[in-house]
Amino acid sequence: MKDYYTYLEKLNQSQSTIERNVYNIGKLKEWCRSKRTKPENLSYKQFLNYINHLKTTNKPETINRHILGAKHYFNYLIEQGVRTDNIADDLKIRGERKKVFYNLLTGDELEDLFYSFETDKIWKDNFYYRATAKRNKVIVGLLVYQGLVSNNFKSLALEHIDLHRGTIYIPSTRRNAERTLALKSWQIIEFKEYIEKVRPIIQDHIGTYDEKLFPVNTPQFRMVLRPILKKLKHHNQKVSNNSHIRASVIVNWLGYYNIRKVQQMAGHRHISSTESYKQDNLENLHEAINKFHPLS
């Protein structure tokens, strides 16, 4: 299993995902032994029998994780020259629970978070706090207009901003694909001041002179986001966390663009990830009523 483990590492999977995939393939091998066969000899019909076996004790979302792990394993066997086909391709169990989002922010509410973020009337006697407040407003813009998350901010470099074209390049992460997104005209103004005046102040204060767009003295960018999100929540109680803002942004995008365009903008590697944000209004209403106003 060591070679398969290395194969999964090359896919940039997290430690927990690798361990889960290895465990799931162990289950597949165990079932194969009971049927006197091996994964490398498994037929499509036999694999369907294995899925039916999983159905007896697992929920659809768990079975789909087993199938995804099998896809990776069969691709590994193909790379090793042991198999010539991937019998798990295009297989997915229906009935997996749909994401349901509550209290999402409207486009106007998202924009209001940006415009209401104060930078001029606080800490006037402290140059560093003034600088970080202006930096934080730039970050808020990327939260509410581009739907960025903590890992995106960590990977941003100065070269990823193109003020002439009014774009920002978002490098790929373990979960999301790379993409280039347009900046709002007012974001460009904020970015220009940040890059030319604010960023150097922060660099000098913390003694960090790398090419990171947002130089910080902490390994986890969420430490920077935490007070920002707290301030946003104070302005609008609907704000819960970074993921909630991103979900609001993506759902709002779906109201303006086709699903393929939103997939690209969100950095989703699979269209199914984008589809999960398309909410059935009646289902949402029913679940929201049950959650917030349960019948006694």
Image: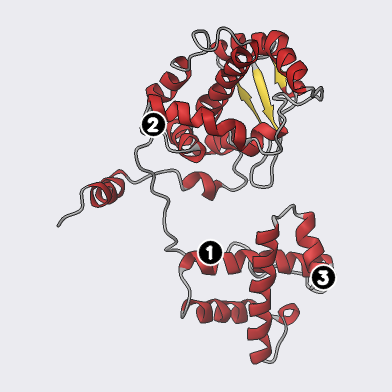
Q: Residue at x 75, y 54 (%)?
A: 11
Determine whether, in the image, residue 20 is placed left or right of residue 262: right
Amino acid type of the residue that numbered disc 3 sits on in the rendered structure: Lys
Spatial CA distance of label 1 from label 3 is 27 Å
Determine whether, in the image, residue 20 is placed left or right of residue 78: left
Mark 1 — residue? Answer: 92
Please, what secondary structure does the residue beneath circle 1 have? loop
Amino acid type of the residue that numbered disc 1 sits on in the rendered structure: Lys
Residue 70 percent location from the top left of the image: 66, 69
In the image, 273 versus 18, the foreground residue is 18
Q: Residue at x 58, y 24 (%)?
A: 139
Determine whether, in the image, residue 178 is placed left or right of residue 76: left
User: Is residue 256 visible to us here?
Assistant: no
Q: Residue at x 65, y 20 (%)?
A: 167
Residue 63 percent location from the top left of the image: 53, 69
Amino acid type of the residue that numbered disc 2 sits on in the rendered structure: Leu
Please, what secondary structure does the residue beneath circle 2 have? loop
Q: Give the image's coloring scheme.
A: secondary structure
Splitting the image into 4 quarters, where does residue 162 fall? top right
Label 1 Cα crowd, 10 Å radius (few <14 / some 14-19 / many 20+): some
The numbered mark at residue 2 is 3
Spatial CA distance of label 1 from label 2 is 32 Å
Q: Earlier in the sequence, mark 3 or mark 2?
A: 3
Residue 15 percent location from the top left of the image: 70, 59
Q: Residue at x 66, y 60 (%)?
A: 16
Mark 2 — residue? Answer: 105
Please, what secondary structure does the residue beneath circle 3 have? helix
Determine whether, in the image, residue 218 is placed left or right of residue 123: right
Label 3 Cα crowd, 10 Å radius (few <14 / some 14-19 / many 20+): few
